[in-house]
Protein backbone atom coordinates (compact mmCIF):
# COMPACT_ATOMS: atom_id res chain seq x y z
CA UNK A 1 0.00 0.00 0.00
CA UNK A 2 1.60 3.22 -1.13
CA UNK A 3 0.58 6.35 0.73
CA UNK A 4 1.76 9.40 -1.22
CA UNK A 5 0.22 12.30 0.68
CA UNK A 6 1.56 15.79 0.18
CA UNK A 7 3.45 17.18 3.14
CA UNK A 8 2.18 20.27 4.87
CA UNK A 9 3.78 23.39 3.38
CA UNK A 10 5.47 23.91 6.74
CA UNK A 11 7.40 20.64 6.31
CA UNK A 12 8.45 21.02 2.67
CA UNK A 13 12.21 20.60 2.35
CA UNK A 14 12.83 24.24 1.38
CA UNK A 15 10.91 25.47 4.43
CA UNK A 16 12.68 23.05 6.76
CA UNK A 17 16.05 24.27 5.45
CA UNK A 18 15.00 27.84 6.29
CA UNK A 19 14.06 26.76 9.82
CA UNK A 20 17.47 25.08 10.15
CA UNK A 21 19.21 28.27 8.93
CA UNK A 22 17.42 30.22 11.68
CA UNK A 23 18.42 27.63 14.29
CA UNK A 24 22.09 27.71 13.28
CA UNK A 25 24.46 29.62 15.54
CA UNK A 26 28.17 30.33 15.05
CA UNK A 27 30.04 27.05 15.61
CA UNK A 28 26.72 25.36 16.54
CA UNK A 29 25.10 23.84 13.46
CA UNK A 30 21.53 22.55 13.69
CA UNK A 31 20.52 18.91 13.82
CA UNK A 32 18.04 17.37 11.39
CA UNK A 33 16.30 14.03 11.12
CA UNK A 34 16.66 12.61 7.60
CA UNK A 35 14.11 10.07 6.34
CA UNK A 36 15.01 7.71 3.52
CA UNK A 37 12.60 6.92 0.71
CA UNK A 38 10.41 3.86 1.21
CA UNK A 39 11.71 2.38 -2.05
CA UNK A 40 15.23 2.09 -0.58
CA UNK A 41 15.86 -1.58 0.24
CA UNK A 42 18.38 -1.82 3.06
CA UNK A 43 19.50 -3.90 5.98
CA UNK A 44 21.37 -2.55 9.00
CA UNK A 45 24.83 -2.83 7.42
CA UNK A 46 23.87 -1.38 4.06
CA UNK A 47 22.00 1.46 5.77
CA UNK A 48 25.20 2.61 7.47
CA UNK A 49 27.03 2.46 4.14
CA UNK A 50 24.23 4.32 2.32
CA UNK A 51 24.06 7.05 4.97
CA UNK A 52 27.85 7.52 4.86
CA UNK A 53 27.71 7.81 1.05
CA UNK A 54 24.82 10.31 1.12
CA UNK A 55 26.65 12.53 3.62
CA UNK A 56 30.02 12.25 1.85
CA UNK A 57 28.42 13.11 -1.52
CA UNK A 58 26.72 16.14 0.06
CA UNK A 59 30.01 17.43 1.49
CA UNK A 60 31.81 16.89 -1.83
CA UNK A 61 29.09 18.90 -3.59
CA UNK A 62 29.85 22.00 -1.54
CA UNK A 63 32.71 24.46 -1.48
CA UNK A 64 33.76 26.82 1.28
CA UNK A 65 34.20 26.76 5.03
CA UNK A 66 31.88 24.60 7.08
CA UNK A 67 31.78 22.51 10.20
CA UNK A 68 32.00 18.85 9.22
CA UNK A 69 28.78 16.90 9.58
CA UNK A 70 28.33 14.61 12.56
CA UNK A 71 26.12 11.58 12.20
CA UNK A 72 23.81 10.78 15.06
CA UNK A 73 21.55 7.79 15.58
CA UNK A 74 20.51 5.54 12.72
CA UNK A 75 16.99 4.25 13.08
CA UNK A 76 16.69 1.17 10.94
CA UNK A 77 12.94 0.57 11.31
CA UNK A 78 12.11 4.22 10.58
CA UNK A 79 14.70 4.32 7.76
CA UNK A 80 16.04 7.54 9.22
CA UNK A 81 19.16 9.08 10.69
CA UNK A 82 20.10 12.29 12.43
CA UNK A 83 22.87 14.58 11.32
CA UNK A 84 24.32 17.76 12.81
CA UNK A 85 25.68 19.90 10.02
CA UNK A 86 25.73 23.25 8.31
CA UNK A 87 22.27 23.93 6.75
CA UNK A 88 23.90 23.92 3.29
CA UNK A 89 25.14 20.37 3.89
CA UNK A 90 21.68 19.29 5.03
CA UNK A 91 20.20 20.92 1.91
CA UNK A 92 22.62 18.86 -0.23
CA UNK A 93 21.70 15.70 1.68
CA UNK A 94 18.02 16.41 0.97
CA UNK A 95 18.76 16.44 -2.79
CA UNK A 96 19.73 12.77 -2.73
CA UNK A 97 17.22 10.55 -4.54
CA UNK A 98 17.37 8.21 -1.53
CA UNK A 99 16.01 10.92 0.79
CA UNK A 100 12.24 11.31 1.20
CA UNK A 101 12.05 14.14 3.73
CA UNK A 102 13.81 16.01 6.51
CA UNK A 103 12.69 17.50 9.78
CA UNK A 104 14.49 19.73 12.25
CA UNK A 105 15.34 17.87 15.45
CA UNK A 106 14.32 20.91 17.47
CA UNK A 107 10.65 21.75 16.93
CA UNK A 108 9.20 24.53 19.06
CA UNK A 109 5.57 23.45 19.25
CA UNK A 110 4.04 20.29 17.88
CA UNK A 111 0.73 20.35 19.71
CA UNK A 112 -2.39 21.51 17.85
CA UNK A 113 -3.72 24.93 18.72
CA UNK A 114 -7.33 25.18 19.93
CA UNK A 115 -9.60 26.58 17.25
CA UNK A 116 -12.34 27.96 19.45
CA UNK A 117 -11.17 29.86 22.53
CA UNK A 118 -13.48 32.04 24.60
Image: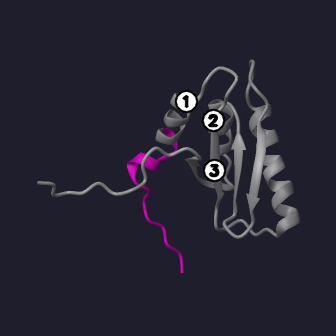
Residue 6 is covered by the magenta coloring = yes
State the separation of the CA atoms marked 1 and 2.
8 Å
Disc 1 versus disc 3: distance between alpha carbons? Answer: 15 Å
Task: Locate residue 11, reporting x and y percent.
Answer: 46, 49
Tag 1 and tag 2, C-beta contact below 8 Å: no
Helix, strand or loop under label 2: loop
Q: Is residue 87 magenta?
A: no
Q: Are marks 2 and 3 in contact (CB under 8 Å)?
A: no
In primary-sequence order, the first of circles 1 and 3 is: 1
For disc 3, the marked residue is 33
Is 106 rendered above or below residue 116? above
If the image is split into quadrants, where does the N terminus sit? bottom right
In this view, 51 is above or below 58: below
Q: Closest to the observer: 113 or 20?
A: 113
Within 10 angstroms of label 1, few (less than 14), some, or many (20 or more) residues? some
The reply to whether discs 1 and 3 touch (Cβ–Cβ < 8 Å) is no
Asked if 7 appears above or below 10 in the picture, the reply is below
Q: Main secondary structure of the magenta part?
A: loop
Mark carried by residue 102: none
Decide which of 113, 80 is in the foreground and name it.
Answer: 113
Q: Which residues are magenta?
A: 1-14
Q: Residue under circle 1?
A: 21
Task: Give the image quarter of residue 69.
Answer: top right
Q: How many marks?
A: 3
Residue 28 percent coordinates (x, y): 67, 27
Circle nearer the N terminus (1, 2): 1
Kindly identify which residue carries mark 2.
Answer: 30
x then y, percent, for residue 22:
51, 29
Amino acid sequence: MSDKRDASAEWKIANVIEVLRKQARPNQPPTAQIFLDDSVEIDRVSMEELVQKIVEDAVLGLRGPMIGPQLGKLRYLAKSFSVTADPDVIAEIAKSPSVRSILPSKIDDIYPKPLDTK
